[in-house]
Amino acid sequence: MVSRRQFLTQSGMLAGAMYPAMFALGMMGNASFNPLNLEGETKGKHIVILGAGLAGLSAAYELSKKGYQCTILEARDRVGGRCWSIRKNTSNTEVGMGTHQANFDEGLYFNAGPSRIPHHHELTMHYCKELQIPIEVYNNINESTYYFSEGNGKLSNKKIRVREIHNDTRGYMSELLAKAVDQNKLDTAFTKEDAQKVIEYLRAEGGLDIDKLYKASARRGYIESPGAGEKTGRIADPHQLHDIIASGLMDPDFYNVAEYTYELQMSMFQAKGGMDTIAKGFEKVVGKLIHYHSEVTSIKNIEKEVHIDYKDATGKHSIKADYCICTIPLTVLTNIDHNFSSDVSRAIDYVSYISTGKIGLQFKRRFWEEDENIYGGITHTNNELTQIFYPSYDYLSKKGILIGYYNFNEKAKITGERNFIEREKLALEKGALIHPQYPKEFENSFSVSWHKTKYNMGGWALYSEEERQTVYKALLKPDQQVYFAGEHLSYLNAWMAGAFESSRSIVQQLHQRIQS
Ligand SMILES: Cc1cc2nc3c(=O)[nH]c(=O)nc-3n(C[C@H](O)[C@H](O)[C@H](O)COP(=O)(O)OP(=O)(O)OC[C@H]3O[C@@H](n4cnc5c(N)ncnc54)[C@H](O)[C@@H]3O)c2cc1C
């Protein structure tokens, strides 16, 4: 007897070829996102795809599965674009900073780009399933991590467990509200019964006592853990509300309650072994279509064709195709020669991208786990670091890589202006304020400033409401034979799902055009 899965694997089918077969065998279940409808003929059309990031790879995957002739031009020597994990010997070139190389130990990595998959990003999950990329839970929320506020308040310049601030703030706010409801001071049409129910809710929400007062409870942790015999455990007094406010711990740097946001709600996932295994999964299927090291220098609509110029190590080349899907980030495309319409050209030049950077710090001991019981999650600061991410893989192993900062906008710009050694110095100095173990345990680092990284020059596209109506819409339409795709052409900016959704939509549009 051979199982259906064994049959598919043993018959040597590639992931791409397996999909229709799995559907036919009823193994895929019903995907709740819009399935592609690619009925009809390919009419021998050749499509050139610019960029082997997730948008380009997934477009090539779907189109070649249908039988289209595809060619992918990719400037780098690797697939994935922003979907990139840093391992031993990874190198990166930043404009004005030169090239540097990672010296991490074998088996250790950090994700310089995407690190989290929301459970509702169905297309990302779909491709992980279809390409058989193992995923694991990413621990995005951890009450054991810290808030660290630089400033003058009583609670400033010291690390405070997130659970203390969360529960104290929740308690005080609930107490205030409960008193107001009790004294009928809220302008609401509560009946007496409603008011009673709301107060009961607030007591549960804030951990209030019978008199509706907030007092410390085990929710905010112990200063002496409970244990055997007479060890009841000891709870500290709550922080004073005034101190929390004066120390900036209710500022958006901390209390933006990131985990309440739709995208960051648990469960979250990551690809096992590094997020770039997703890109590599596509590469297994469409890798033969990719010209690596091929930097596009010109894109021209000429009569019913598209002509692309590119250069590689051997010199300059040209390629003609019936259609083009361009997934090159706009920050890079703006410097590429083209003959697009003035609306499209203006849009390419106009859209701005976020500045963002991360640094991976390798430590010889997982002191955050061993000394501080932190397993995954994020520490928040109001200084240049902004966030420290603890790894959500290989818990309890010997060494590990922390993301020593993950910052944005001005903070990322300032950090990015420093050279690689100065960035490391900043991460270590500021990080040691929270984790004094840093100097003793640190081994090496690797930083990426996305807004300075060649072939990206930005984190992700940013649009105002108005720009969504103008420049964004100009890029959603093809310019003659050239279609634009990528995270920048979605409402899921900063997410891999944006790249997938955009490329899927373009594949559908292009196929429909070829049918008509
Ligand atoms: C710091 C950071 C954190 C992120 N976190 C998350 C996260 O947690 N979860 C999540 O889902 N998403 C996350 N994202 C977003 C996600 O990485 C992107 O949305 C997605 O990878 C974009 O894919 P893309 O194909 O549109 O673009 P890219 O990945 O940028 O692909 C474009 C490709 O074009 C190539 N190229 C550029 N210029 C040329 C040229 N001249 N010639 C030929 N090729 C060229 C590039 O090398 C690249 O391969 C994050 C991104 C960043 C930067």
Image (tube, rainbow, N blue to C red):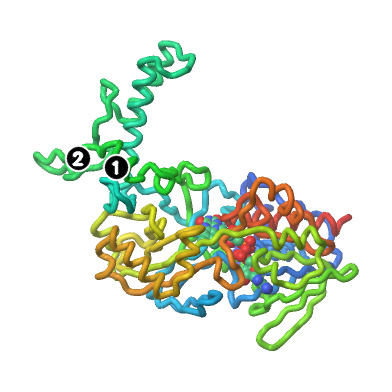
Query: The residue under label 1 is which amino acid type?
Result: Glu
Question: Foreground: 21 or 378?
Answer: 378
Residue 298 percent coordinates (x, y):
76, 74
Query: In the structure shown, which secondary structural element does the residue marked by tag 1 occupy?
Result: helix
Q: Quadrant of ligand 1?
A: bottom right
Question: Is residue 239 among what the camera can see?
Answer: yes
Residue 454 percent coordinates (x, y):
59, 73
Seen in the image, is 85 located left or right of residue 482? left
Query: In the structure shown, which secondary structural element does the residue marked by tag 2 occupy?
Result: loop
Query: Can you tell which mark lies on residue 174?
Result: none
Q: Confirm or reject: label 1 Cβ below 8 Å from ligand 1.
A: no
Residue 209 percent coordinates (x, y):
26, 25
Residue placed under numbered mark 2 in the picture? 236
Query: Can you tell which mark lies on residue 164?
Result: 1
Question: Is residue 5 among what the camera can see?
Answer: no
Q: Does residue 121 lie above or below 302 as drawn?
A: above
Question: Foreground: 148 or 292?
Answer: 148
